[in-house]
Image: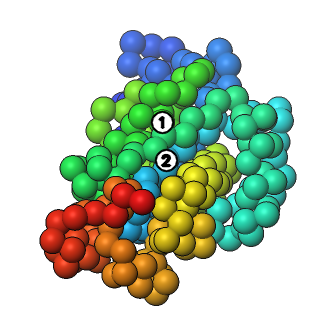
Amino acid sequence: MSRRRPPAGNGGGGLFEDPLVAIARARPLRIAGVDEAGRGPLAGPVSVAAVILDPDRPIDGLNDSKKLTEARREALYPLIVERALAWRIEFVEADEIDALNILQATLTGMRRALAGLSPAADSARIDGNRLPTGLPCAAEAIIGGDAIEPAIMAASILAKVARDRRMLELHLRYPQYGFDRHKGYPSPAHLAALSAHGPCPQHRRSYAPVRDALLRYGGTVSTS
């Protein structure tokens, strides 16, 4: 676990008091959970969500999105949106992923999601082992946080459902790739479609299977 927090103070309201301690004396801290979905796919955006849960409006059944069925994720999504104090979903599109690399694109999405929360978070708990730079609040990175921190669980559900819905939209534009089934991940069916049709504009050119397919097609892309 890694952390980025303000220097700890004496908790007594002195000159060097931790700002979070001072806020907590006035009201409950607003702690955002942050998670992403879609780092591994060959196509589509990476989706990042930030959620501040409301302790007075608990949500039963939160869990890591990967451990929930699609139906359960879809049922929880509107509850999170309705009951959270704040939530934000950011997409980082394929062209920006190619420009930045997937790690930096994900960190960029996390920074944008946190910056877009209203009300703002006092601190953030981010799933993983890396923290973005330039965050608007104190933060800590928690490995496996989507299995232990409810706010991160909620963020993982929003990110996953939002990305799956986007891939269904892309399927309507590019039905030959089967995005509705594999959501852009490198399944055998997706690789076969990529070989047969070449990449579409939503494919990530920095990923080796897409780059190789693009070379085979002489740099052309599928647009239909």
Q: Sequence-wise, which precedes: disc 2 or disc 1?
A: 2
Side of 52 where 37 appears, left or right: left
Judge by depth and name the residue closer to the eye, 222 or 132.
Answer: 222
Judge by depth and name the residue closer to the eye, 27 or 85.
Answer: 85
User: Which of the labelled discs sits on residue 48, or is there none?
Assistant: 2
Q: Residue at x 78, y 34 (%)?
A: 82
Q: Residue at x 70, y 29 (%)?
A: 85
Side of 83 where 157 appears, left or right: left
Q: Quadrant of the N terminus?
A: bottom left
Residue 48, compared with residue 18, is above or below; it is: below
Q: Position of residue 190 (x, y in %)?
A: 45, 78
Residue 30 image-quadrant placement: top right
Circle 1 residue: 113
- Does the rendering let one see residue 60? yes
Q: Residue at x 43, y 53 (%)?
A: 45
Q: Position of residue 49 (x, y in %)?
A: 54, 44
Residue 92, compared with residue 26, is above or below; it is: below
Crowding at mark 2 (Cα within 10 Å: few <14, some 14-19, many 20+) = many
Circle 1 sits in a helix, a strand or a loop, which is it? helix
Number of marks drawn: 2
Q: Residue at x 39, y 37 (%)?
A: 111
Residue 73, compared with residue 198, is above or below; it is: above
Q: Are marks 2 and 1 in contact (CB under 8 Å)?
A: yes
Q: Amino acid at mark 2?
A: Val
Q: Amino acid at mark 1?
A: Ala
